[in-house]
Image (spheres, coloured by chain):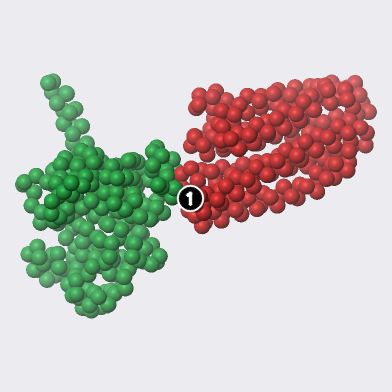
């Protein structure tokens, strides 16, 4: 191979790696005999928000959990294909799950603060990772709470129990807790589905801000929410990725009739 | 049928009624002109208020559906198209009204020679035909039919372009009919706009069904987007 060709090839590879933060290549997942994900190919760009939509049981949460290896905890699960973050297969033997989860934070449907103080909730991830330097922890807790748009509301009661916060505040606390360990990817499984409209608006605003620093994948059943916050939308149905495109395209002129039927509420 | 489906169905029915109303206004304005029927012209002027209130009702229905149902994809395109078609139809209604205002000002029955030479009546017929075509295209969701309007409109353009010379010649030979000749020229100019409004409606029908934007494209480009 000529030098210029080699150079062009490696430049292309570097560009490709820089462009996509997360990739899945022909991923199949089985829960025992149940084929939950069927050959999913998707590439997710850095610093974008990708919404996963589809009816219940279509595989979107399963797909989301692939990227911090949460599915590993389920008995009888079998995964084929490749899941890459920053071009590296996260299912390869060299990857330690603890290290992976430092890079990939997750926020769940229901806020799940620990029965500890607000401060200790956010500091928890740092402490379990062996960080004990007091001023470092304080600085990181403050920064994470600010990133999660919660600092102004809790700065005077950091020593109070997190359980006393409202649902919306608890969810933002969980986001702050995930941010404290400085991940580069944030997975969110219906993070606002249990919240009132004002708390939902705050979470959505927060997601919009966070994409400057993180790559975010969010599962949502709320079509308008997907439209408001995401750059890309992927529609899953019966374990298949039916369509993935820019959110604008999906919500104005989707290619697949199944996508159109789902987003317009005419499914089934 | 979902709640949204039934709302959209009703909106479609209302817009088709609006098409019918405007078609009838255009038809009556021609009759009023040909027969110098001032009663019929007055009827058109009164009915114009119905066209206006119908426009407002359809606008309000679209606004409500958007606010309450958050439609997307084909439903959203349909609503956006209905809003614009509605506005275009109201303008066609305005044109019928203007024709009847001219009729109310006429003192003499329009000269047959002038009507024939200027091709004004032919223009009325082509305008009604084009409006009927876009109505059918909307009702049948037929984009091929909608596209046929772009060719039909050329007849109106041609009559409009030639009208200036024809009317000038007529005035030179009929000094006693200057006012009527100028009214005729004004009506030709207005009817040419019916063609433009119908082209806009055809573009909206194509946008709603095929998600293609034809606005500000040349005739050639519009044909190529098939």
Judge left or right: residue B25 versus residue A263.
right
Whether residue A95 can be seen here: yes
Q: Quadrant of residue B40?
A: top right
What residue is at 79 percent from the left and 24 percent from the top?
B119
Which one is nearer the viewer's eye here, A114 or A40? A40
Compared with B147, B205 (above or below) is below
Compared with A83, A163 (above or below) is below
**Chain identifier for the red-coloured part of the image:** B
Q: Where is residue B20 in the image (x, y as percent from the top left)?
A: 70, 41
Q: Is mark 1 on a helix, strand or loop?
A: loop
In the rendered image, which quarter contains the N terminus of chain A? Answer: top left
The chain that hosts pointer 1 is B
**Chain identifier for the green-coloured part of the image:** A
Q: Quadrant of residue B116?
A: top right
Compared with A209, B162 (above or below) is above
Judge left or right: residue A257 versus residue B197.
left
Judge left or right: residue A253 versus residue B21.
left
Which one is nearer the viewer's eye here, A238 or B186? A238
Q: In the rendered image, which residue does mark 1 sit on?
A: B71
What residue is at 75 percent from the left and 29 percent from the top?
B125
Q: Position of residue B122 (x, y in %)?
A: 77, 25
What residue is at 13 percent from the left and 51 percent from the top?
A76
Q: Position of residue A107 (x, y in %)?
A: 24, 60
What residue is at 74 percent from the left and 35 percent from the top?
B190
């Amino acid at each position: 191979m000529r030098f210029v060709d080699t150079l062009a090839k490696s430049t292309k590879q570097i560009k490709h790696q820089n462009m996509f933060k997360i990739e899945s290549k022909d991923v199949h997942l089985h829960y025992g005999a149940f084929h939950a994900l069927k050959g999913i190919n998707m590439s997710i760009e850095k610093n974008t928000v990708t919404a996963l939509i589809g009816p219940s049981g279509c595989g979107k949460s399963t797909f989301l959990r692939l990227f911090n290896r949460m599915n590993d905890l389920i008995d009888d699960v079998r995964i084929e294909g490749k899941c890459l973050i920053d071009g590296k297969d996260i299912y390869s033997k060299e990857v330690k799950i603890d290290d992976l989860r430092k890079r990939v934070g997750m926020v769940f449907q229901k806020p799940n603060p620990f029965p500890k103080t607000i401060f200790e909730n956010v500091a928890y991830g740092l402490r379990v990772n062996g960080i004990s330097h007091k001023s470092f922890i304080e600085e990181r807790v403050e920064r994470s709470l600010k990133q999660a748009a919660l600092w102004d509301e809790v700065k005077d009661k950091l020593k109070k129990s997190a359980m006393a916060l409202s649902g919306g505040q608890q969810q933002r606390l969980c986001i702050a807790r995930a941010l404290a360990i400085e991940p580069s990817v944030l997975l969110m499984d219906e993070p606002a589905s249990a919240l009132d409209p004002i708390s939902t608006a705050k979470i959505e605003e927060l997601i919009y801000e966070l994409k400057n620093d993180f790559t975010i994948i969010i599962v949502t059943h709320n079509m308008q929410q997907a439209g408001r916050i995401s750059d890309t939308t992927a529609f899953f149905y019966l374990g298949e990725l039916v369509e993935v495109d820019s959110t604008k395209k999906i919500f104005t002129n989707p290619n697949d009739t199944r996508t159109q039927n789902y987003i317009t509420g005419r499914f089934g | 049928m979902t709640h949204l489906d039934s709302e959209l169905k009703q909106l479609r029915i209302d817009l088709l009624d609006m098409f019918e109303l405007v078609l009838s206004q255009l038809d009556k304005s021609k009759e009023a002109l040909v027969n110098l029927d001032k009663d019929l012209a007055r009827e058109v002027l009164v009915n114009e208020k119905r066209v206006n209130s119908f426009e407002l009702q359809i606008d309000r229905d679209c606004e409500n559906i958007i606010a309450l149902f958050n439609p997307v994809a084909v439903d959203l395109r349909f609503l956006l198209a209905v809003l614009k078609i509605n506005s275009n139809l109201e303008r066609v209604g305005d044109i019928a009204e203007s024709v009847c205002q001219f009729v109310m000002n006429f003192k003499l029955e329009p000269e047959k020679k002038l009507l024939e030479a200027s091709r004004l009546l032919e223009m009325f017929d082509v305008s009604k035909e084009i409006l009927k075509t876009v109505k059918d295209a909307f009702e049948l969701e037929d984009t091929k039919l909608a596209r046929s309007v772009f060719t039909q409109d050329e007849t109106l353009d041609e009559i409009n372009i030639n009208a200036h010379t024809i009317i000038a010649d007529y005035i030179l030979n009929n000094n006693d009919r200057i006012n009527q000749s100028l009214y005729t020229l004004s009506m030709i100019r207005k009817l040419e706009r019916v063609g433009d409004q119908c082209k806009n409606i055809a573009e909206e029908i194509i946008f709603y069904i095929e998600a293609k934007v034809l606005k500000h494209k040349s005739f050639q480009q519009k044909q190529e987007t098939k």
